[in-house]
Image (cartoon, rainbow, N blue to C red):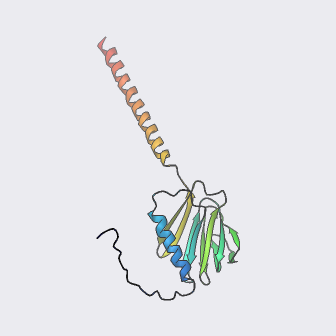
């Protein structure tokens, strides 16, 4: 095919999307694009999650975050605490650190978890356990820390081996006299 030749693509009619679906499609495209990036240019400042009425979200907050209800209405339960919170769009709720928080929606809702200390050094991981989505917010570990610890252990082992060798040599020379 020459460089000047053009290709005609078939026109496919797009059906009208139900209410709120455009937002979900945009979010799915954003998630897919972010997965394809090797390394983000800047750290994520927050984590957004969409909730349907039949979905729940557990948040394991190891950093200290604020949960904002961006759209809809959410029912928030803190594990081990007797009182629940009903939050409307625009409400900010402080999440207790190191406590699991359960979030469910009365209809379609969007919630945004933002770390109180800022985005630097915060890692987000979304998983699933028995059908429940779980968002883990943790302090991001420096990948070099493991390497530094390994090198330190290697030097310690080398020093111990050298001391043991020197002691054996010294005892062997003493026994020779």
Q: Give the percent coordinates (x, y) of residue 124.
A: 54, 62
Q: Is residue 116 left or right of residue 35?
A: right
Q: Is residue 160 left or right of residue 51?
A: left
Give the answer, above or below, for where 84 lies relative to 156.
Answer: below
Residue visible at 61% across and 79% down in the picture: 109
Q: Is residue 26 left or right of residue 36?
A: right
- Would residue 79 be seen by someone viewing this image from the given angle? no
Q: Quadrant of residue 171?
A: top left
Q: How many marks?
A: 0
Q: Give the percent coordinates (x, y) of residue 13.
A: 44, 87
Residue visible at 70% across and 70% down in the picture: 92
Q: Nearer the viewer, residue 20 or 55?
A: 20
Residue visible at 56% across and 74% down in the picture: 57
Q: Quadrant of the C terminus?
A: top left
Q: Quadrant of the N terminus?
A: bottom left
Residue visible at 32% across and 15% down in the picture: 173
Q: Give the percent coordinates (x, y) of residue 60.
A: 57, 65
Give the answer, above or below, for where 165 lies relative to 57.
Answer: above
Q: Give the percent coordinates (x, y) of residue 82.
A: 68, 74
Q: Is residue 60 left or right of residue 163?
A: right
Q: Residue furthest top?
A: 177
- Would residue 128 be seen by someone viewing this image from the given angle? yes
Q: Nearer the viewer, residue 128 or 164?
A: 128
Q: Nearer the viewer, residue 96 or 175?
A: 96
Q: Quadrant of residue 120?
A: bottom right
Q: Residue furthest right?
A: 91
């Amino acid at each position: 095919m020459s460089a000047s030749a053009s290709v005609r693509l078939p026109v496919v009619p797009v059906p009208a999307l139900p209410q709120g679906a455009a937002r979900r499609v945009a979010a799915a495209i954003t998630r897919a694009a972010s997965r394809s990036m090797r390394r983000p240019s800047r750290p994520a400042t927050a984590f957004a999650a969409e909730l349907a009425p039949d979905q729940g979200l557990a948040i394991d907050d190891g950093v200290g975050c604020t949960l904002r209800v961006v759209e809809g209405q959410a029912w928030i339960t803190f594990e081990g605490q007797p009182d629940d919170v009903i939050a409307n769009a625009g409400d900010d709720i402080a999440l207790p650190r190191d406590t699991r928080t359960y979030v469910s929606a009365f209809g379609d809702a969007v919630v945004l978890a933002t770390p109180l200390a800022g985005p630097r050094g915060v890692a987000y991981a979304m998983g699933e356990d028995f059908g429940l989505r779980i968002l883990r917010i943790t302090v991001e570990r420096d990948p070099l820390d493991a390497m530094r610890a390994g090198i330190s252990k290697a030097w310690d082992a080398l020093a111990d081996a050298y001391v043991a060798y020197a002691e054996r040599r010294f005892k062997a020379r003493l026994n020779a006299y």
